Image (cartoon, rainbow, N blue to C red):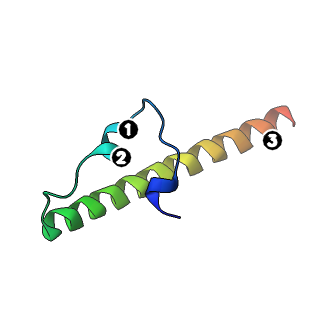
Amino acid sequence: MDIDDLPLKKSGPMTEVEREDLSAESADQLQERVERLEAEITRTKQEIKAKQASRAAADAFFGP
C-alpha cells in the first residue's frame, strides 16, 4: 500500500508531515528523515505496549 492510498486526516500531528514536499530534499536528508521517523515509530510502539500493560494490569485487578 502506498502512503498516497491512506486517508489523510484534516488535522493532527502527522498532517503537516504527510503533506510536506520532499522533492527539494537530498537523498541524505531523506535518509535522515526516514531514520528519525523510524525512531519515532519505535518510541510510539513502546508507549502502546506500556499502555496495554497498564490496561491488562487494571483488568486483572478489577476483572474484565
Asked if 53 appears above or below 23 in the picture, the reply is above
Question: At 31% across and 38% down in the image, what residue appears?
Answer: 16
Q: CA distance from mark 2 to mark 3?
A: 39 Å
Residue picked out by circle 2: 18
- Rendered image: mark on residue 60: 3
In this view of the protein, which residue sits in the foreground, 22 or 44?
Answer: 22
Mark earlier in primary sequence (2, 3):
2
- Which residue occupies the extreme right position in the image? 64
Viewer-side label of 1, 3: 1
Q: Position of residue 47 (x, y in %)?
A: 50, 46
Question: At 58% across and 51% down in the image, what residue appears?
Answer: 49
Asked if 37 appears above or below 48 in the picture, the reply is below
- Quarter of the image for residue 17 reads top left
Q: CA distance from mark 1 to mark 3?
A: 37 Å
Element assignment for label 2: helix
Identify which amino acid the numbered label 2 is placed on.
Answer: Glu
Residue picked out by circle 1: 15
Question: At 47% across and 41% down in the image, what residue appears?
Answer: 8
In this view of the protein, which residue sits in the foreground, 54 or 5?
Answer: 5
Element assignment for label 3: helix
In this view of the protein, which residue sits in the foreground, 12 or 45?
Answer: 12
Q: Residues within 10 Å of mark 2 (few under 14, many from 20)?
A: few
Identify which amino acid the numbered label 3 is placed on.
Answer: Ala
